[in-house]
Image (cartoon, rainbow, N blue to C red):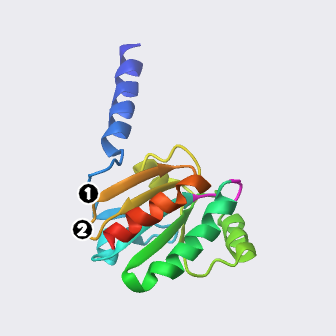
Amino acid sequence: MRYIFLLASIVIFTRQAVAISEGQSVPAQIFSLANGDALSISKFQGQVVYLDFWASWCGPCKRSLPWLQEIAERFKERGLRVVAVNLDQNSVDGQKFIRELGLKALEVHFDPDGVSAEAFSVDSMPSSVLIDKSGKVRAVLHGFRESEKEELVTKIEGLL
């Protein structure tokens, strides 16, 4: 019984230790991609990154991703990168979703094993992390609300 309690404590502590919160630096290697490559924060050095976690079955994602497409196009020249990480277990579902919505300005990655979601403590869909030019987390967002779009745009503009 003590062993089970100790093991559970280690798992809980480990998950808390990797939770991403405002003001923290993003780890050098954000996560491994489905194809085995690593997505590194150094790839985005000097740029503001909006890292969005989504899935094809997520209703709010159907509203948030087209808006992220608009934001990506609007601020691309000023240094904003929108990175959309699909968490579907079958990446074909995510690819179909992207095609149906016509999303071309987003940098899309697939993480069917959910490694990135665990590293960023994703607990709802969509979940997003706004990262400044130096690699620090400036906002952690859970869900998508139309009423918060203007505030988010203002925050992005301030970081650019």
Say which mark, if any, is on residue 25.
1
Say which mark, if any, is on residue 97.
none
Q: Residue at point 48% right, 52% down? A: 117
Task: State the quadrant of the N terminus.
Answer: top left
Circle 2 sits on which residue? 134
- Disc 2 and disc 1 in contact, CB within 8 angstroms: yes
Determine if residue 31 is in view.
Answer: no
Q: Which residues are magenta?
A: 54-59
Residue at the outermost top position: 1
Front position in the image: 46 or 73 = 73
Q: Main secondary structure of the magenta part?
A: loop
Q: For the residue labelled by badge 2, is the local secondary structure a helix, a strand or a loop?
A: loop
Going by the numbered disc 1, the residue's amino acid type is Ser
Going by the numbered disc 2, the residue's amino acid type is Ser
Left or right: 120 as drawn, with respect to 148? left
**Total marks in image:** 2
Asked if the magenta segment contains residue 84, the reply would be no
**Residue 55: where, in percent of width, then height?**
64, 58
Residue at the outermost bottom position: 77
Q: Residue at point 33% right, 74% down? A: 160
**Residue 120: where, in percent of width, then height?**
42, 51
Determine if residue 46 is in view.
Answer: yes
- C-alpha gap between disc 2 and disc 1: 8 Å
